[in-house]
Image (spheres, grey):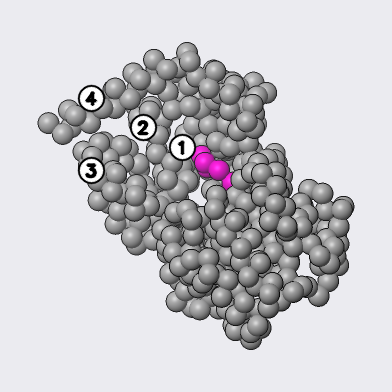
Amino acid sequence: MSERWARALLTTYRLAGAAAYPLIGGYLAWRATRGKEDHSRRRERYGITRRKRPPGPLAWMHAASVGETVAVTPLMERIAGLGIQIVLTTGTVTSARVVEERIGQKVIHQYVPLDVRPAVRNFLDHWEPDLAIIAESEIWPVTIGELGARRVPQVLVNGRVSERSFKAWSKRGWLAEAIFENFAAVAAQSDEDAERFRALGARPVTVTGNLKVDVAPPPVDERLLLTIKTQIGARKTWAAISTHAGEEAAAARVHRMVRQRHPNLLTIIVPRHPERCSALVEEFEQQGLKVVRRSRIEDGIAPDTDILLGDTIGEMGLYLRLTEIAFVGRSLTSEGGQNPLEPAMLGTAVLAGLNVQNFRDSYQKLIASGGAKLVKDRDMLAGAVNYLLNNPETRQEMIKAGRAAVNDMRGALTKTMRVLDPFIQPLSVKSRLKDGNGADR
């Protein structure tokens, strides 16, 4: 009975997607006007491309956005080094820019096809992948079903299941099993993630750790860093990064509270979505705060500048190197949290709200080591920032503990490659044996 219901629901999902397919063009055009789609490459969302499939074995890797893309970059480099071609798909314009800047020509980048049968089939017919590697928690029923029908092995790496997602899937266990059983292997971030995947029907599941720990710290333009540090001078700083709606206002309030004790304070605010910055500037200025946007840094950070607003993409390495205290957002007024590993890597004492479920394993280890502390509200955040500014010894202890915790968590890349080895090695052998003209295709 349950199996029939699962098949019926999946069929309904596929039919609904097929029915909506002719109408999707308008939706994508609307997203393009908001900067959320690349208008010149919108056909890729239908699985259509002008890029040719290279000869030889090919792996399709999918990473939803910037964080996932950065996390799997070392993994892609390892696989490409074995002679296997890689098509990397992502779903956001910002992640496409990151691929261009950090990976360049090492992979072929495409926007992920919509999870409707015509688009998925166009994509798979063209690229004919020998292996599909999906990062973290991207579960697309039509795509998974089409890959399964073509007997393409599917491996989920850096896998995680949030508490909310697990509850939702568990209510439809028979549907979850019909989808998750398609994975040939799952490499989970933590023991808890692994147990959730098993409960949803995935087999086999291996705990490999978080690939984000094995990524190099985000880069920085050293000349720009020196310029901004010179402008800041001896002022005290703290940062609120990856913030979501409501957290910027909280950070501004913290700034006004802490400034009473530290009159030379500079607050660095880096919203998760830079397109919100124009509205934030207006909001801050209405409160009497003086703001400098990073994109207009030529205006200079004056002694009376209150806020440096990070309105650029891909410069977290810059912002975090300007301070030793970082509040990590989507944790105070939003839920789920954001990645605390980069702040810990780059030498900041990490603060966050209580809602960090999506990165619970990383936070647990950072907190246990003394490298991170959670705050329940804005006032507690202000108290923590003030305390760390007043106590450099405690701040340095947190920084040291955070770096040590990150080092202890490393090793996920090697473990993930072991999970992938049964699928990668045959392709690597095939690559070595093929002739120079790619005669095996």
Name the amino acid type tagged 3: Lys
Which residue is tagged 3? Answer: 171
Q: Amino acid at mark 1?
A: Leu
How far is mark 4 from mark 3, CA to CA? 16 Å
Q: Secondary structure at mark 4?
A: helix
Question: In the rendered structure, which disc, 2 or 1, sits on the residue that comes first in sequence?
Answer: 1
Say few, some or many: other residues with alpha carbon within 10 Å of mark 4 (under 14 / 14 to 19 / 20 or more).
few
What span is colored magenta in the figure?
62-67
Comparing 35 with 82, the one in front is 35
Residue that badge 1 annotates: 131
Please identify the quarter of the rendering in which residue 147 is found: top left
Residue 283 visible, this orientation? yes
Q: Residue 141 — which label? A: 2
Cα distance in 3D space between marks 2 and 4: 13 Å
Locate the N terminus by quadrant: top left
Picture quadrant of residue 226: bottom right
Q: Quadrant of residue 438?
A: top right
Q: Earlier in the sequence, mark 3 or mark 2?
A: 2
- Does 180 appear in magenta? no
Q: Secondary structure at mark 1?
A: strand
Instruction: Tell me: 387 left or right of 24.
Output: right
